[in-house]
Image (cartoon, helix red, strand yellow):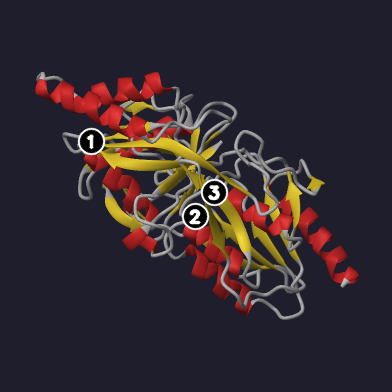
Amino acid sequence: MSGRDLFCQPRRRRRGAALTLVFASVLVAGAATGSLPEGERKSAAGQDRSTVPASHHEDVAKAAADAMADGKSPMEAAERAVSRSGDRWGAVYSEGEYEEFEEALDGQYTGVGLWARRERDGRIEVTKVQSGSPAAAAGIHKGDRLRSVDGAYVDGRPVTEVVSLLRGDTTDAAAGTAVKLGLERGTHAWSETVHRAKLSTDSVTVQRLAGGITVIKIAAFTKGSGDVVRTAVQQASADAGVILDLRGNSGGLVTEAVTAASAFLDGGLVATYDVDGEQRALHADPGGDTTRPLVALVDGGTMSAAELLTGALQDRGRAVVVGSRTFGKGSVQMPSKLPGGGVAELTVGHYRTPSGHSVDGRGITPDLDVTSQGQAAVERAETVLGGLGDAS
């Protein structure tokens, strides 16, 4: 398991915070992207459960208002109301938490710039240090061991907990706040105090393989990532294929996923979705590259907006999907403000692939089941691309 101090969802103030990834799939609207009607802000992960009626937003808001009038916590009252609704992925955020969530989707985060993973022996190893970050300035290197964060030992802890410690609580995680790290390199152990900073994410990376194949890895659909994908396709070698690596992509801005789809489609349907029973549709822009061999590489960590993109490319015969079954997140959530400044997000609908298949609770079955991981999976995708090139 691996993580980074970006990919931690703002601490949800409900039922022990089930999710740890920041990028639940997001249907962003209005002024944010100009592509969907105002109010349909987020699509979040869910399993196959009944849609919560829109009126439940009013129930949650009333619970918060009544609690405030009685001098009690409106956040706690809203959390209880969401819990009673049966909406597994409904959530209540403080105002600060929600701002942090939206900031991350804009491609920014506040942290120290470390990626980490837990080894089999339980120790936490630094796997990458972001260039120009506080961690890099402090001389922390890939391969160093992270032993403690602000005095709390991290050996044996899930990476998600370590990430939360690195980021700090929402009240003390602002840029400029200090965090003391206990580190180890070989036999040398030391402590380093670094200050959190606002950093930019690199959600899309592009790699050229031998033979001209372009690998486009999308870690999450943050703001602007769709245009990066389109540019990468336009700059790819004219006579070589593309591997679209969506493994571990837990979602993001759906409008960015649609833009990415537009790189490979000449207009047409990407997905349909419903909000309180009303059907809507998402369409690709015309002018995409429809002939270049394309493989979409997925796994059980491919979720939400990434599944929406995968389903569109598969259903429309544009890509061969390679890997393992995707997670199965396809429920639409809508946020509403609460008395006291919080935000509640409740499930109001689901999205479907162009052929009408529901992703929620089912996931997407790849065309070629590949259990290989890491670079071995990329090599299998290369082999498939080679076959597509021969067929063309």
**Distance of mark 3 from mark 2, alpha carbons?**
12 Å
- Disc assigned to residue 338: 1
Quadrant where the N terminus sits is top right
- Of the two numbered discs 1 and 3 on the same chain, state the one appearing first in sequence: 3
Relative to 191, is 17 above or below?
Answer: above
The residue under label 1 is which amino acid type?
Leu
Instruction: Select label 3 or label 2 by which is in front.
Output: 3
Spot occupied by residue 368 in the image (x, y as percentages of width and height): 81, 48
The residue under label 2 is which amino acid type?
Val
Mark 1 falls on what kind of element? Answer: loop
**Distance of mark 1 from mark 3, alpha carbons?**
26 Å
Mark 1 surroundings within 10 Å by alpha-carbon count, few (fewer than 14), some (14 through 19), many (20 or more): many
Q: Is residue 111 left or right of residue 309?
A: left
Quadrant where the C terminus sits is bottom right
**Distance of mark 2 from mark 1, alpha carbons?**
25 Å
Identify the residue at horizontal 35%, vertical 32% (top origin): 55
Give the residue number, with chain letter if any, for mark 3. Answer: 273
Relative to 301, is 388 above or below?
Answer: below
Is residue 162 visible to the viewer in this orientation of the structure? yes
Outermost residue, front side: 278
Is residue 205 visible to the viewer in this orientation of the structure? no
Mark 2 falls on what kind of element? Answer: helix
Mark 3 surroundings within 10 Å by alpha-carbon count, few (fewer than 14), some (14 through 19), many (20 or more): many
Spot occupied by residue 20 in the image (x, y as percentages of width and height): 44, 35
* Along the line of sight, the residue nearer the viewer: 44 or 170: 44
- Of the two numbered discs 3 and 2 on the same chain, state the one appearing first in sequence: 2
Give the residue number, with chain letter if any, for mark 2. Answer: 254
Relative to 106, is 7 above or below?
Answer: above
